[in-house]
């Protein structure tokens, strides 16, 4: 109730392992066909829902999945976007000289996500830029490709605020902007002029 969700007890009318799953799938299809919804968010790590996701997307719906780290690729790739849910880390209590902390409450220090540079981004630039005349790819097209190949991709997972900030941390990549037309990414040329 605190989160303003309404529990659907209708799924409990019969016992069985897949009773709720089947009812949920039927309700989703009905909502799509009745044009009551065109975007669906499933919070699950159960690959049994991969087929439902594919069918919803075939009919033009957008499907988001929120799942645990153990979520199989079949379910991740059946969605338009996958969000990996992880239990929040135990809060770190900062030292405070006043009794009970600030205003009598514990002070919790946020832990920043360490910045990482996955090689998949360089491979994506190599692949996409190889088919262009100038050896560059638009930043937007790069982001779309990364999302298509891994629906869970997000720069924030790697500790970056945006894709452009992430690209700037790669010593082997160069990002340019021309006449306000957006950003372009390519491999940094070696000393002999050949791209890396």
Image: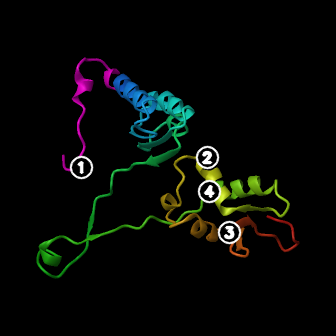
Q: How many marks?
A: 4
| Pointer 3 local density, CA inside 10 Å: few below 14, some 14–19, many at least 20 | some
For residue 183, the mark is 3
Identify the residue at image location x=34%, y=24%: 23
Find the distance from the CA under tag 3 to the CA under tag 2.
Answer: 20 Å
Q: Position of residue 166 (x, y in %)?
A: 58, 66
The answer to whether residue 119 of the structure is visible from this angle is no
Pointer 2 and pointer 1: residues touching (CB < 8 Å)? no
Earlier residue among tags 2 and 4: 4
For residue 119, above or below residue 47: below
For residue 107, the mark is none
Q: Nearer the viewer, residue 2 or 104?
A: 2
Mark 3 secondary-structure assignment: strand
Residue 152 on the magenta span: no
Residue that mark 1 sits on: 3
| Pointer 1 local density, CA inside 10 Å: few below 14, some 14–19, many at least 20 | few
Horizontally, residue 107 falls left or right of residue 132, namely left
Identify the residue at image location x=64%, y=54%: 120
Mark 4 secondary-structure assignment: helix
Horizontally, residue 108 falls left or right of residue 160, namely left
Residue that mark 2 sits on: 148
Earlier residue among tags 2 and 1: 1
Find the distance from the CA under tag 2 to the CA under tag 1.
Answer: 31 Å
């Amino acid at each position: 109730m605190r989160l303003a969700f309404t529990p659907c007890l209708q799924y409990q009318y019969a016992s069985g392992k897949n009773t709720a799953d089947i009812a949920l799938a039927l309700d989703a299809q009905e909502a799509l066909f009745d044009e009551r919804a065109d975007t669906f968010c499933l919070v699950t790590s159960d690959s049994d829902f991969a087929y439902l996701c594919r069918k919803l997307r075939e009919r033009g719906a957008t499907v988001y999945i929120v799942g645990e780290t153990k979520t199989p690729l079949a379910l991740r790739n059946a969605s338009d976007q996958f969000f990996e849910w992880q239990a929040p880390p135990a809060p770190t209590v900062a030292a405070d000289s006043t009794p009970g902390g600030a205003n009598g409450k514990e002070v919790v220090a946020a832990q920043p996500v360490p910045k990482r540079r996955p090689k998949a981004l360089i491979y994506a630039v190599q692949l996409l830029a190889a088919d262009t005349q100038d050896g560059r790819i638009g930043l937007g097209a790069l982001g779309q490709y990364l999302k298509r190949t891994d629906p869970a991709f997000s720069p924030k997972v790697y500790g970056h605020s945006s894709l452009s900030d992430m690209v700037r941390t790669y010593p082997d990549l160069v990002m340019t902007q021309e006449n306000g037309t957006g950003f372009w990414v390519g491999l940094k040329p070696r000393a002999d002029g050949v791209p890396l």
